[in-house]
C-alpha cells in the first residue's frame, strides 16, 4: 500500500497513485484520529500536523488497507 502514496516521507502534501478511496483516516502514533476524508481527493494535506509517524486506514472498493506515513 505504501507504494500507492507519495512522497513518503513527506513534508505535508501526499498524493495517491492508482487508488481512489471512499474513506481515509489518519491516526497519530498514540492512535488518535487526527484527520478524516469521507470522499476522494487526489491529495491530502498534513502540513498542519507535527512531524512523526502516522498510520492511514484506507477504505476503497469495500476493502480496508493500512499504510504508515512519515511526516518530516
Image (tube, rainbow, N blue to C red):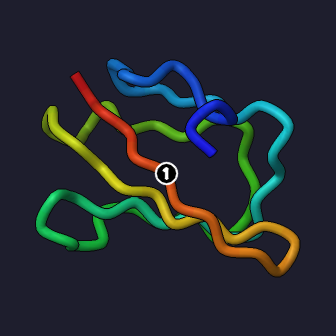
* Number of numbered tags placed on the structure image: 1
Quarter of the figure with residue 64? bottom right
Residue drawn at (76%, 75%) of the image? 63
Position of 16 with respect to 20 (left or right) is: left
Residue at x-position 56% and y-position 38%: 2
What residue sits right under mark 1 in the picture?
Answer: 67
Quadrant where the N terminus sits is top right
The picture places residue 33, in percent across and down from the top left corner, at: 30, 72
Q: Looking at the picture, does residue 55 appear above or below residue 42?
A: below
> In terms of image quadrants, where is residue 62?
bottom right
**63 vs 39, nearest the viewer:** 63
- Left/right placement of residue 64 relative to residue 33 reads right
Q: Is residue 14 above or below residue 53?
A: above
Residue at horizontal 76%, vertical 59%? 21
* Image coordinates for residue 14, horizontal then vertical, percent: 53, 30
The image quarter containing residue 39 is bottom right
Q: Is residue 18 above or below residue 35?
A: above
Where is residue 9? Give x, y as percent. 36, 22
| Image quarter (top left, top right, bottom left or bottom right) of the C terminus | top left
Amino acid at each position: 500500500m505504501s507504494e500507492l502514496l507519495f512522497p513518503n516521507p513527506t513534508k505535508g502534501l501526499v498524493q495517491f497513485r492508482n487508488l481512489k478511496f471512499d474513506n481515509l483516516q489518519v491516526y497519530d502514533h498514540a492512535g488518535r484520529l487526527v484527520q478524516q476524508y469521507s470522499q476522494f481527493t487526489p491529495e491530502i494535506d498534513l502540513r498542519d500536523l507535527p512531524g512523526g509517524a502516522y498510520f492511514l486506514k484506507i477504505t476503497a472498493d469495500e476493502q480496508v488497507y493500512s499504510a504508515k506515513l512519515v511526516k518530516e
